Amino acid sequence: HGIIYTYRVDFIEGHAAMIESQNTPGVAGNLSDDQASNVSRGSLGSLETFQKYKIINAHTQQLKGIFYQFVFVGSNLYSTIKLEQRITLETACPFYGRYYTIVIEKCSAFLLDDLNNSKMEDHPVALSFINSIIKNSLRNSALRQIGRNPRFFMPAQAKTFQGQVATWPGFFTSSWIF
C-alpha cells in the first residue's frame, strides 16, 4: 500500500469528423462547441493540455470503472491501481474535428513513504502528482485560479479603491520538500 502508479497517456489522432449529408472530411457537423472548436486548424499534431482534459473528461466514467480513482495531469494518469496491460479507449464522438484513440500504459511507480526521506527534486513525477492534488483541491474551493500557474485568489474578499481598482487577496502554492 502507499504505491502510486504512473501511466503515460497518449492521444493518437484518428480520422476527421464528417458531415453525414455531405461526407466532407474535417468539417464539423452537429458537434458541441467543445468538440467543434479549432476544427479549422486541420490536423492538430499535438494537443494542448486543456484539449487533453476535455477528451479525458468525456471518458471519466470508463476510467473510474478501471482505476476507481485517478488523477490526470497533462500526459500522465496517477492511480493506486496497478495494471500491467495497455488500455485503449476510442472517442465515441469527435473532438476538435477528429476522433482520437487514447492509449494508457504503466510507466513507473513510487512509494509515498519514500518521499519523507528524500528531496522532491529526486522525484519529479511525485512532485507533479502532489501539485496536481493541491491545485485540484483549490479549484474545487471558493478560490479562483487566474492563469496556468497555481495562483489562487479570494474574490469574496476583494477591495475596491476609488471605484476603479480592485485587489483580490490570494496566494501561490507549490509542494516542495527540502
Image (spheres, rainbow, N blue to C red):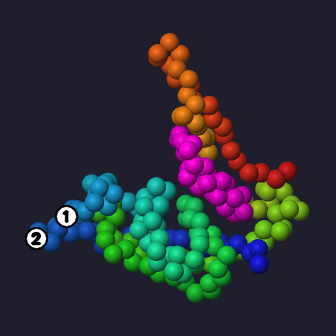
Relative to 58, say whether 139 is above or below: above
Query: Residue at horizontal 61%, vertical 40%?
Result: 151
Tag 1 residue:
29
Cα separation between marks 1 and 2 = 9 Å
Mark on residue 21?
Answer: 2
Relative to 150, say whether 19 is above or below: below
Query: Residue at horizontal 32%, vertical 54%?
Result: 38
Q: Quick one: SS at disc 1?
A: loop
- The answer to which of marks 1 and 2 sits earlier in the sequence is 2
Instruction: Tell whether position 139 is magenta.
Output: yes
Task: Report crowding for label 1: few under 14, some 14 to 19, many 20 or more residues within 10 A (C-alpha).
Answer: some
Identified by mark 2, the residue type is: Ser
Q: Is residue 77 left or right of residue 40?
A: right
Q: Position of residue 77 (x, y in %)?
A: 59, 69
Q: Residue furthest left?
A: 21
Q: Is residue 1 left or right of residue 169?
A: right
Task: Report crowding for label 2: few under 14, some 14 to 19, many 20 or more residues within 10 A (C-alpha).
Answer: few
Decide which of 77, 23 is in the foreground and name it: 77
Q: Position of residue 45 (x, y in %)?
A: 41, 62
Q: Quick one: SS at disc 2?
A: loop
Point out the stretch of residues depicted in magenta: 125-149
Would you say residue 116 is visible in this rendering?
A: yes
Where residue 144 sits, quadrant-wise, is: top right
Relative to 18, say whether 86 is above or below: below
